Image (cartoon, rainbow, N blue to C red):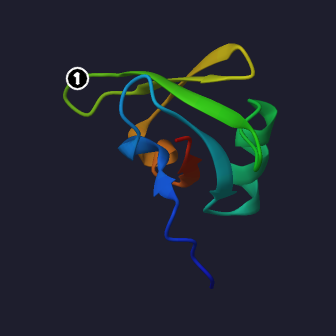
Amino acid sequence: MNFDFRTVPLTQLPPGGGGRVWRVLGGRGMALRLARLGIRPGAAVRLVNAGPWRGPLLVEVEGVRVALGRGVASRILVRPLP
């Protein structure tokens, strides 16, 4: 498996930081579920807010805000925007 070391999990973006989805790790079901939310390779995402005490992340994708658990968000690899 080839990994791009310029990518980071979505959970590692700073609040207000953005990036482009590079890959979704996990099975086909996970990829389909996230694609229905607009989170697919090439989509621009922005971390709006991270909940306290390892709570959910509020992510904006294509103008829509979506809450994601940290386990799911850690499977979304993004290339941070400069």
Type of amino acid under label 1: Pro
Answer few, some or many: residues within 10 Å of disc 1's Cα (few below 14, many 20 plus, some between 14 and 19).
few
Q: At x 76% / y 50%, what residue is drawn?
A: 41
Residue 14: percent from the left, percent from the top?
A: 36, 33
Q: At x 31% / y 22%, what residue is drawn?
A: 51
* Residue of label 1: 52
Secondary-structure class at tag 1:
loop
Number of numbered discs on residues: 1
State whether residue 2 is above or below residue 36.
below
The extreme left residue here reads: 53
Query: Left or right: where does residue 51 sit relative to residue 78?
Result: left
Which residue is more in the foreground, 80 or 8? 80
Which residue is more in the foreground, 17 or 25? 17
Residue 34: percent from the left, percent from the top?
A: 70, 40
State whether residue 74 is above or below residue 81.
below
In the figure, residue 38 lies in which quadrant?
A: top right
In the figure, residue 60 lies in which quadrant?
A: top right
Residue 1: percent from the left, percent from the top?
A: 62, 85
